[in-house]
Amino acid sequence: MKNEDLTWLTDEARIALDVWEQQHRGSWIKEFIDPKEVRADVEAHLWHARGESEKPVTLDQVKEAIQEMGFAAPVEPYPLVEAHKAGFFALIGRFLGHPFFWGVWPLIVVLVEMATGLLAGMFFDPISRTPQAVLLLSFCVLGTLGLLKKLNEQRPAWLSILRGAGLVVAGYWSLLLLPVLVIGFLGYGLCIVYTMGIGILAIPLFLICMATAAAPLYLFYGFLRSTNLERNRGPWLIGILLGLGLLLIVEGPSYVTRYAVVKDDPGLIRKLGSEETLLSMCYEGRVGKKSFTDTTGFIPSLTKWDIFGRAGGVNLKEIGKRRELYYRTTGRSFNVPGDGGVLPDWLGGRSQSRGVTLDEDLGGDGVAGRVADLDLSASRLDAHINASSRLGYWEWTMEFGNSGKRNKEARMQLLLPADGVVSRLTLWVNDEPQEAAFSSTAKVTKAYKSIAVQERRDPVLVRWVGADRVLVQCFPILPNKDMRIRIGITAPLDAEGRLFLPRIIEKNFGVPEDLESSIWIQGDTEMSLDGLQGKGAKGKWRETHGKLPARELMARHTHVKCDLPEEPAMVWAEDPFAGNTLVRTRLPLRSSGAKDDLVIVIDGSSYFSKWTETADEAIAELREAGHGVRVIVAAQEEIFEDPSTLTAIDFAGGQDCISALEAGLNLATSTGSRHLVWLHGAQPVTFSTEEGFLQLLERGFHQVDFSVVDLDGGPNRLLEKVSKRIGIAGAARPVELDELIPELKGILESKRERYEWKRQEDMPEGGKHVSDQLARWYAWKQVKKASTGSPDRDKLAKLAAKYQLVTPVSGAVVLETKEDYKRFGLKQVDVDTAPSVPGIPEPSTALLVLIGSLMVWRRARIQQK
Amino acid sequence: MGDGFDNWTVQLRKGILEFCVLSSIAVEEEAYGYELVQMLVSAPGLDASEGSIYPLLSRMRKQGLIQSRLEESEAGPARKYYRLTNAGKARSLAMQSYYEGLTDAVNSIGNPKK
């Protein structure tokens, strides 16, 4: 009899038959009688004797049949039968021992947990990864199938194997949920006392609790019943081994990850670990009360061993170490993955406690970790391009939605168009747009933190954090409300007529997969942006518009390509802030013709693997062109000097580039190279101090131009720190692989336009009149140039604030009331002086506007005099 | 009739039961054990019990007269089927021949006119 689960026999009868067979098999074998055949005879007798009856065969009927058939009588008593005849075990055997508790009930519980994230929200996520869900659901479904009578009566050996595996799997999860068992029973008690409120919460808890207890108990009961028969031991043991193997496959990578975190071994995580677990570890201790997020975090928290780390001991330093390890392992920032609105359960994504997750980084100086229930709900980009002045102006209007129960702060780092500057900031307060106040970084930051963090009222803050990067913070986004902000950015077109789109490179909110950014670009030249279909023309004005997926815009550099007419030799604009005219005269391109040597430092993080062949070609081409090129590569946590080919290097994980930059600078000094070019991706953490590199750059006797080529985008703390202290000579953002070589050549040949600037009281003779963005951009150039070396940062901050710019020394903040501005010594800008994307006027209207604006400017100048 | 008669019938049935089993199996190529037993048990006059048939089947199998096999059943427990071995077939034919001779002899003794 292969199937121990004969439903047409009572448990007692079946066990009696088992024990009887066990008792006599020795003597049968001696007489050359096959015990299987004897068993088959008895079972056939019982089966046929039962006939059509629905009642199962009883113990007495078994005894009677054995006697009738002339076989040796059973030796009384039957130990197992007796044990199950009375007391608590009888209840277990008859009630919890029912296969229902192995299949249907756990299936309900697993589905309820997957749907609600109840446990995930309250304790830790028992089903945090897909393999766990697959394993648990498979066993539940197979257990449910096992209930089918047909299966039971076929008695397949695989059912015993399945049960053996189920015993291990159910036992493992039950041990994990043992604390819940207690709480569950308590909850059930409360459920009885209170029919509402906590009682409702207690019902699923009670379900979990019962399944936690019942499944392994049932399986263990089956194990005890079956393994007293020699022939059933094999399938059960195979099943137990299978269960252990499955657990190893499903949980092994997570335990390996925790072990590797203790050992600080990113290579081990890449080989055998789980990036998903490492990511969840980056949040442990930082999302409200949770100090562990999954099954493999909970177990170590109960022990004194430090093999897998002690999640209970997570502190800020430990979290920092984990976030750093996440970068070293994956090459990405921990807060970049998971762009979607759906969050993992350990972050409160589907839990009943949804929305009450604390944001412990509120009002901080960085973007930090993802916040539950906060999403970008709308995005609109408007741009105006002036081909004559080679300047563009973006306005990015964003709306954030909060579907949680607490006020939320949205934080993001924006990558501005190359050499761009934030020149406008607007916050809608009570549906009214409110312009920002521009002042020193310290002043606006203080105001924001005071109003937002302490007083919990509406401000928005934009601060410069590094080369072409600003940090945006807005708070509070009220539950079930939207917050709307607008950021204006003035930026130059590059030599090829490209104007990059601003891009979110780090954020603490989700971006729904189907969210699209509406884009409108207008200007006095033909332009195109891949994906935008709409086109229009009115007089000299052209426009293109359409929608692009918001996530796509975050994932890569994107630019508008403009047809550039020949640049006027001279352009001029009224400077509304200085009350005079700013004139820019183009100087002829100057090229010495010398072939400068350069040292290329490569950030060999994982992103670089797609660039290897292109970079090899670029290096070869530069060498062929007569440039002395030396290469330093930071990869595999080592430094490679002048590798014969980049394709031979394994680019994995994230690298710390500071040592490579220092080595590159030393090499540039020793070889007399003029350029140090850093090809980099994201580096969201810094490992070691950058002082050595900066000291060499600032004090070295050999002058080196430091340029950066951003191949990947993404937050880069090292670049942020370095760019605060030294000027970046050149910057490039190749979008496609084939753009790398021209970008590098552009840096070497200094193919940037050179200008002479002057101010005068009157309008110049000739020249092209352009918008006052020219004045803002000139001020930005002045502040940027002086900010790394000027001792008088206050003066610079005043200049930046006067031109309404967010610079290394100044920021922008919008506060809620006029009193708030007054209290912090800030002055809100006049909306008339703020830049905007102008409407395209009718030709006659345009003339009137021009005349009018000239009169206004003239009047302002006279008043200033 | 008394103890002497009872003992005689028991001995006669015991001797003839083995022949009945072999004959029953020989009729069909293969016989389902349970049905075989039930047929013998219910045969009028044979007065066989399961308690006597099962041990006999075991003994005959041990002697190599019959062989059995188990077949999994879609409904109910595995089914056991019996068939005759060559030795069993020979024994069955020999028994048949002897039995016919014996009954002829008994009939002729009991009916001298014939």
Image: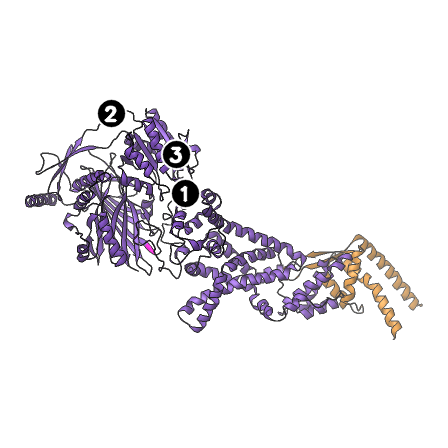
Chain colours: A purple, B orange
Magenta region's main secondary structure? Answer: loop
- Which stretch did the figure color magenta? A363-374
Discs 2, 1: same chain? yes
**Residue at the disc numbered 1:** A328
Viewed as shown, does residue B37 lie left or right of A850?
right
The residue positioned 31% from the left and 54% from the top of the image is A362
The quarter of the image holding the C terminus of chain A is: top left
In the picture, measured across the screen, residue B57 lies left or right of residue A621, that is: right
Labels 3, 1: one chain: yes
Q: Name the residue tied to disc 3.
A: A633
Figure quadrant of the N terminus of chain A: bottom right
| Closer to viewer: mark 3 or mark 2 | 3
User: 10 Å neighbourhood of mark 2: few (<14), some, or many (≥20)?
Assistant: few
Q: Are marks 2 and 1 in contact (CB under 8 Å)?
A: no
Measured as percent of width and height from the top left, residue A561 is found at: 26, 38
Q: Is residue B46 magenta?
A: no
Q: Position of residue B107 (x, y in %)?
A: 89, 66
- The single residue placed furthest to the bottom in the displayed view is B1
Q: Earlier in the sequence, mark 2 or mark 1?
A: 1
Q: Residue A674 location in percent, x, y? A: 29, 29
In the rendered structure, find residue A42 and report the number of the disc placed on it. Answer: none
Distance, label 3 to label 2, CA atoms, is: 30 Å
Both on one chain, marks 3 and 2?
A: yes
Mark 1, other Cα within 10 Å: few <14 / some 14–19 / many ≥20: many
| Residue A168 placement: quadrant | bottom right
Residue type of the residue flagged with mark 1: Arg
Q: Which residue is mark 2?
A: A592
B31 relative position to A689: left or right: right
The chain under label 2 reads A
* SS assignment at label 2: loop
